[in-house]
Image: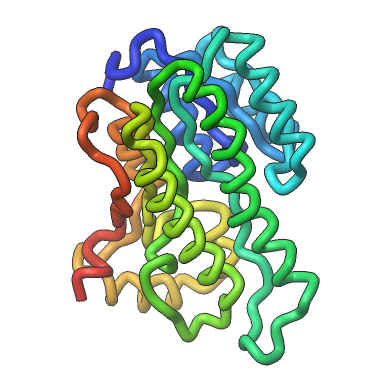
Amino acid sequence: MKNSLPDRVALVTGGGSGIGRAAAVAFARAGARVVVSDVDPEKGAETVRMMPASSTFIQADVSVTSQVKDLIRQAVELHGKLDCAFNNAGIEGAIARLHEYPDTAWDRIIQVNLKGTWLCMKYELRQMLKLGKGAIVNTSSTAGHVGSRGRMSAYIASKHGVLGLTRTAAVEYGAKGIRVNALCPGAVRTPMTERLLGADPERAERMAQFIPMARFGTPDEVAEAAVWLCSDAASYVNGLALPIDGGYLAH
């Protein structure tokens, strides 16, 4: 969506790889000045090198209040405002049945995926309220809509929570000119997906058989939806949980 975000300042968290990296590049292509954030400085810097000179990287762990607060402060100091944000940072965590799930692994996933999204929204909204407008997109998942036998109870709980936060914020801030929506990617070829699948092409093939389009998605296909939701083309879209899953949830 070239030039759909002229004179906008956009923040992308989890921008060091996968969907976040693709989104950062897509926001820049749409005309936005982009602040890329990630917990990994090397990967974040690598993303910025793919983008225009107006793009910047700020390291932050979204589960830490002081770091999120400083991230938003620095972004506004650099560019004078914050128009839109793609809260994409997330982890998959441990794989175990619910009754065997490690406490520490559960806590970390909730801290990053759910608390991290809440913290980012908290400080982004403060800036957007000053502007009297804004757009926020949160990354949930098809796992935010359904249960699974995949032994990922913490991840699934966190992504359900992200949808709850998204809908609540959409109701609370819509009249203030701030739209809040969520993307729900399905099977997308990202480093996270590769870690979950391992070196098992047969497993990937079996997963694809459950998708009506019979293939995995790409990070770019998710990224373009994030840009659209932040653009004026989606000016009356608020509180949406948009599946990008090749039709998986249509079953």
Horizontal and vertical percent position of residue 187: 39, 62
Which image quarter: residue 113?
Answer: bottom right
**Front residue of this view, candidates 66 and 206:** 66
Residue 163's place in the image compared with 59, above or below, is below
Horizontal and vertical percent position of residue 155: 57, 68
Horizontal and vertical percent position of residue 247: 22, 64
Q: Report the colour scheme.
A: rainbow
Total labels drawn: 0
Residue ID at (42%, 51%): 168
Residue 189's place in the image compared with 122, above or below, is below
Which image quarter: residue 94?
Answer: bottom right
Residue ID at (40%, 37%): 173
Which image quarter: residue 241?
Answer: bottom left
Residue ID at (35%, 35%): 179
Q: Residue furthest bottom?
A: 99
**Front residue of this view, candidates 158 and 29:** 158
Q: In this view, does 148 lie to the left or right of 94?
A: left
Horizontal and vertical percent position of residue 4: 28, 18
Q: In this view, does 152 lie to the left or right of 171?
A: right
Q: In which quarter of the image is the C terminus?
A: bottom left
Q: Quadrant of the N terminus?
A: top left
Q: In this view, does 151 lie to the left or right of 248?
A: right
